[in-house]
Structures are given as C-alpha cells and as structure tokens.
Image (tube, rainbow, N blue to C red):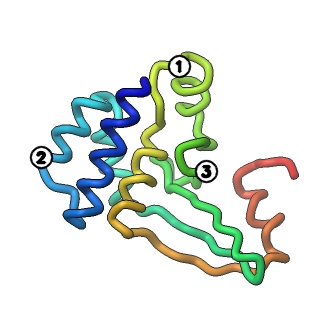
Amino acid sequence: MFMRKNVFNSLLKKIEEKSELTEDIIEELKELFPDKIEKTLEILKKGIIQYTFSPSGRKIWAVVGSKNDLHLIYPYTYCSCLDFYKSVVINRKSILCKHLIAHLISSSLNSFEEVSLKDEDFSKFLKQFKIKI
C-alpha cells in the first residue's frame, strides 16, 4: 500500500507539472485504481468544492457524489462516503476512495469551485453531511 501511495503522489506531481490529465496519466491511474478511475473521472466532471470560512480561514472540501449528494473530504485522510468506510477503513482493500482520488487530482490541476462562507454558518453547513457536532 505504501508503494501505491508513492506512485500516486508521483502521478499527482506529473498532473501538476503538465496542468492537465493526459491519456498516459489516466492509463497509469487505471493500473493503480482499476475499479475506481472511471467513476473518479465522472466525479471530476461534476466538480470539487472548496469552502472557505471567514474570518477564520478554515477550509472544508466537498465532492459531489454519484447521487448528487455531497461528501465531506479531509485530503488523504477521510471521506464521508460509504466506500471509504468499507474499502479503506474496514477491509483495507484500497488506500483511497474515488472521491479522495478526484479531490487530489483536482487539487493538482488547481481546478475546483471556491465558495466563501461566514464562520457563523459552519454548524449549519456541516449538518448537510449528517455529522454530529
């Protein structure tokens, strides 16, 4: 798993350097994540959102899922989707879910929607993810 993460990180650097997701890189991603890359590409088309709260500067990432629901993302660490819980946390079959892969690719491309919100809206914002605070 550690080696796979290193290979993925080097692919992210390539994406960042080229500022595009080339067919060659997509093929390499398919080798790393054969069961996830097609859905990852669909997620990238739907978009990744970075919410910035002010005045704190807190940043929260969200990804639009296959059913147009939002999934909360902590880069490299967490996604609120069921696949992350099952494949990454419980079964340890993968290092990332498709939403985290899409987020990291979009970050490397610097291609995501930015939304500004006020700090006082933070609790209300989190409720859409069904997170208890």
Helix, strand or loop under label 1: loop
Quickly name the residue at label 3: 74
Task: Give how far across and how far down residue 85 sits, in percent.
Answer: 61, 29
What crowding class fits label 1: few (fewer than 14 Cα within 10 Å), some (14-19), or many (20 or more)? few
Identify which amino acid the numbered label 3 is placed on: Tyr
Which sits earlier in the primary sequence, circle 2 or circle 1? Answer: 2
- In the rendered structure, are the residues bearing label 3 and label 2 in contact, judged by CB atoms less than 8 Å apart? no
Identify which amino acid the numbered label 1 is placed on: Arg
Which residue is most to the right?
133
65 in relation to 45, above or below: above
Judged left or right of residue 122, residue 47 is: left
- At x 73%, y 81%, the residue is 54
- At x 28%, y 41%, the residue is 38
Which sits earlier in the primary sequence, circle 1 or circle 3? Answer: 3
Residue 112, numbered label:
none
What separation in Å lies between label 1 and label 3 (alpha carbons)? Answer: 18 Å
Residue 92, numbered label:
1
- At x 70%, y 79%, the residue is 117
Judged left or right of residue 101, residue 84 is: right
Judged left or right of residue 38, residue 132 is: right
Which sits earlier in the primary sequence, circle 3 or circle 2? Answer: 2
Identify which amino acid the numbered label 2 is placed on: Asp
What crowding class fits label 3: few (fewer than 14 Cα within 10 Å), some (14-19), or many (20 or more)? some
What separation in Å lies between label 2 and label 1 (alpha carbons)? Answer: 27 Å
What crowding class fits label 2: few (fewer than 14 Cα within 10 Å), some (14-19), or many (20 or more)? few
Task: Give how far across and how far down residue 24 sits, in percent.
Answer: 12, 46
Task: Give how far across and how far down residue 102 sits, in percent.
Answer: 40, 50
Judged left or right of residue 107, residue 10 is: left
Helix, strand or loop under label 2: helix
Residue 24, numbered label:
2
